[in-house]
Amino acid sequence: MKWQALVLAGERPEGDALAKAEGAPTKAFIEIAGKPMIAHVLETLSAVGDIASITVSLSPSAPALPDGPWRRIASAAGPSASVAQAFQTIGPPLLVTTADNPMMRPQTVDTFLAEAASLDATAIAGIAREETATKIEGAPQRSVMRFRDGGVNGCNLFALRTTEAAAVIAFWQRLEGLRKRPLALAAQIGPLIAARFLAGKLDLAEAKAALARKTGAPVGTVTLSDPLAPHDVDKPAHLAFARRILGAA
């Protein structure tokens, strides 16, 4: 299976605090190991044999991308809208990742795509077990989603295998629009599911089944063992860690 890849590199209207602190025009262009953060992501994707094309979604006012075999499109108002817009034009199968994922490695993407292609699911997320993110000495703490069968971290890797994935994207758009209204957000997810998750009584399989019922599309996860997979760059500690790892590569 040959995949198209989409890199989300847009920003919210208020900008990004880390980019401002670093004096970078946008977060994607923060320098790490002598090059913009997004350059590391593009180089990784270019080294994955199952990726046929790469598209970058970013603001029209953002700087020029490094030279390479990728195209640039304008981002929409938020990540879910940008994915929806790109999915309409690029179509499936589509790998989605982010410009703040510079420690992503080609072999990890290879593993994710191979396992995603084997699942009976239309939308698949890469995850890592909570303990995976701490296997590298000095690794910063990551946000954890706590399920009854263990905590997991997201890895900013998503596979949209079929046209049915549009329903999952639309549901994501609804949730993103309600991110500042917790009661309305809980109503969209389902009050019972939300309450069980907050109480630590929901397991991962139940969460995926609930999402499939909400969207009408089967969803899945791929658990990755790479200790760098859960580490993106959101905070100064994450940036320092990325500079240490990529500066030593």
Image: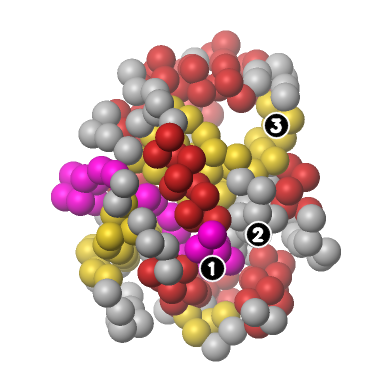
Which residue, as the protein is rendered here, is positioned at the far right? 137
Rendered image: mark on residue 146: 3
Rendered image: mark on residue 102: 1
Rendered image: mark on residue 228: 2
Residue found at x 58% / y 66%: 103
Q: Nearer the viewer, residue 73 or 110?
A: 110
Rendered image: mark on residue 63: none
Asked which quadrant contains residue 123, the reply is top left
Q: Nearer the viewer, residue 126 or 173?
A: 126
Is 93 placed left or right of 89 in the picture?
Answer: right
Please provide percent x and percent y for residue 228.
65, 59
Give the mark toward the camera: 2 or 3. Answer: 2
Is 138 placed left or right of 15 in the picture?
Answer: right
Where does the magenta region start and end?
A: 84-107
- Judging from the image, what secondary structure is the residue with disc 2 in? loop
Are the two marked residues, 2 and 1, in contact with CB atoms closer than 8 angstroms? no
Magenta-colored stretch includes residue 102:
yes
Quarter of the figure that contains the C terminus: bottom right
Which residue, as the protein is rendered here, is positioned at the far left? 89
